Structure formats: C-alpha cells, structure tokens
Image: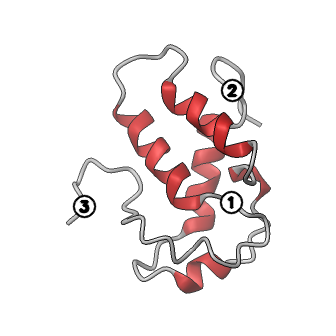
Amino acid sequence: MINEDTAIPCTTCRYCVEGCPENIAIPDYFALYNSAKRAVTDNISSQFVYYLNLTSTHGKASDCIDCKQCEKACPQHLKITEYLKDVSAEFDAGPGLPTK
C-alpha cells in the first residue's frame, strides 16, 4: 500500500510508459516529484538534477500532449496528465525560477 504522505500514489508498474508519443518517463518523474515533496531543503535538489538527466533522453513533463493513453493503461486509474502538470511546475522552470 502506498503511504498516505505520498503526493502521487504511483506504483511504478510502468504500464503508462509504453506507447507514450512523447517518450515521457512518467513513473520516474513521479518518483522524483514524491521525493522532492518529502525533502526538507529548498536548495537545488538532487531530484532536479536527476530530472534534467532524464529529460536529455526523454520528453519533459511539460511535453505531455494530453492524449491520455497513459491513463487508459494505468491499473491504478491515476489522473496522470494532471500529475504531469504538477511535475512540470516543480521541475521544468528550474530551481528558483517562476513556473510557467
């Protein structure tokens, strides 16, 4: 069972990843987001650095085209496209920068 303090209750089954037209590393981004939300520092985070590394070979969270293919595949019935907006707000603007 996912802890109640988990912002995004993803089980990282990875069913959402196959067929994503933007090649977004959804469960990886959700794990980084959850970790960032539990962090006790406001400094540049290792989660942000990992996110940047992943985006060098995968689509960013903000690249989501809202096709909802991932949501159809998700056995947890998560609103993945909405959660990706949260991830984008956390990481795509960069630390200390305003979100779009």
Query: What is the crowding at mark 3: few (fewer than 14 residues within 10 Å), some, or many (at least 20)?
Result: few
Instruction: Confirm or deny contact between disc 3 and disc 2 (CB under 8 A).
Output: no
Nearer-the-camera pick, 97 or 31: 31
Residue 33 against residue 20 in the figure, above or below: above
**Is 89 left or right of 37, judged from the image as shown?**
right
Residue 77 in which image quadrant: bottom left
Q: CA distance from mark 1 to mark 2?
A: 18 Å
> In the rendered image, which residue does mark 2 sit on?
94
Image position, residue 38 (x, y; %): 34, 34
Q: CA distance from mark 3 to mark 2?
A: 28 Å
Q: CA distance from mark 1 to mark 3?
A: 23 Å
Q: SS class of the residue under badge 1? A: loop
Q: How many marks?
A: 3
> In the rendered image, which residue does mark 1 sit on?
24
For discs 1 and 2, the disc positioned in front in the rendered view: 1
**Identity of the amino acid at label 1?**
Ile
**Identity of the amino acid at label 3?**
Ile
> In the rendered image, which residue does mark 3 sit on?
2
